[in-house]
C-alpha cells in the first residue's frame, strides 16, 4: 500500500503487535484475534483542533504551535507522538466535517505535515 496515502489508517494489533495500513478498520491480518487499533482524537484534542482551524492560524510559527498544542493534549511528550499519526488523525476528523474554506485549508495543512513525516516512519 502506498505509504504516502493519508486516507489509509495506521493500524496495530493489540494481541500480536503487528502493524499495517488499511483504508478501513479491520481485523489483524496476521493473527485474526483482534481488530486493529488506530490513533483517534479525544474530545479535548478535537476542541483544540477546531479552534486552531477556525482561527485559521497557519503562519510559519503557528503551524508548529498547532501541532504542539495537539501533542500536549495527547499527554505525551512531543517526541513520543509520531507527527504522521497526529496529522492523520486530525485530517481524518476534518474530512468528516461539513466542508468550509477553513476545514479545507486545515486538511491541506495536515496532509502536508503527514507527507513530510510519513517517510521517516517507514525508514
Ligand atoms: Zn494480530
Image (tube, rainbow, N blue to C red):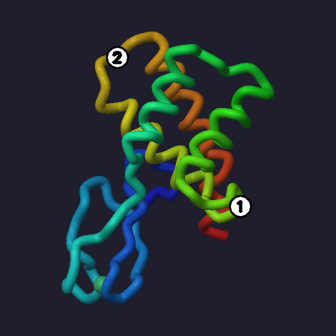
- Element type where label 1 sits in the image: helix
Label 1 belongs to which residue?
A: 79
Please tell me whether mark 1 or mark 2 is closer to you in this view.
1
Asked which quadrant contains residue 79, the reply is: bottom right
Query: Where the C terminus falls, by quadrant?
Result: bottom right
Residue 82 at x, y = what percent? 61, 59
Left or right, 5 with reference to 78: left
Q: Residue 20: give x, y in percent of width and height.
A: 40, 71
Residue pushed farthest right? 61
Nearer to us in this view, 123 or 58 = 58
Q: Distance between the residues labelled 1 and 2?
A: 31 Å
Quadrant where the image shows the N terminus? bottom left
| Mark 1 or mark 2, earlier in chain | 1
Tell me what residue is drawn at x 29 percent, y 70 percent: 36
Between 19 and 89, the residue placed more toward the observer is 89
Q: Where is residue 119 in the image (x, y as percent from the top left)?
A: 64, 58
Q: Is 71 situated left or right of 33 in this image?
A: right
Name the residue tied to disc 2. 99
59 versus 90 height, above or below:
above
Q: Left or right of 12: which side holds 123? A: right
Element class at badge 2: loop
Q: Residues within 10 Å of mark 2 (few under 14, many from 20)?
A: few
* Above-or-below relation of 72 to 50: below
Give the vertical position of 37 relative to 83 (above or below).
below
> Residue at left 54%, top 37%?
111
Tell me which corner region of the image, top left, top right, bottom left or bottom right, holds residue 67: top right
- Disc sitting over residue 50 in the figure: none
> Which residue: 44% across, 20% down?
103
Counting the numbered discs, the total is 2
Amino acid at each position: 500500500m502506498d505509504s504516502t496515502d493519508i486516507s489509509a489508517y495506521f493500524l496495530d494489533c493489540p494481541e500480536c503487535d503487528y502493524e499495517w495500513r488499511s483504508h478501513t478498520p479491520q481485523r489483524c491480518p496476521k493473527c485474526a484475534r483482534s481488530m486493529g487499533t488506530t490513533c483517534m482524537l479525544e474530545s479535548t484534542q478535537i476542541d483544540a483542533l477546531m479552534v486552531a482551524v477556525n482561527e485559521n492560524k497557519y503562519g510559519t510559527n503557528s503551524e508548529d504551535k498547532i501541532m504542539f498544542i495537539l501533542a500536549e493534549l495527547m499527554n505525551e511528550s512531543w517526541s513520543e507522538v509520531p507527527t504522521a499519526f497526529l496529522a492523520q488523525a486530525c485530517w481524518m476528523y476534518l474530512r468528516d466535517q461539513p466542508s468550509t474554506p477553513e476545514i479545507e485549508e486545515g486538511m491541506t495543512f495536515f496532509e502536508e505535515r503527514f507527507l513530510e513525516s510519513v517517510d521517516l516512519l517507514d525508514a
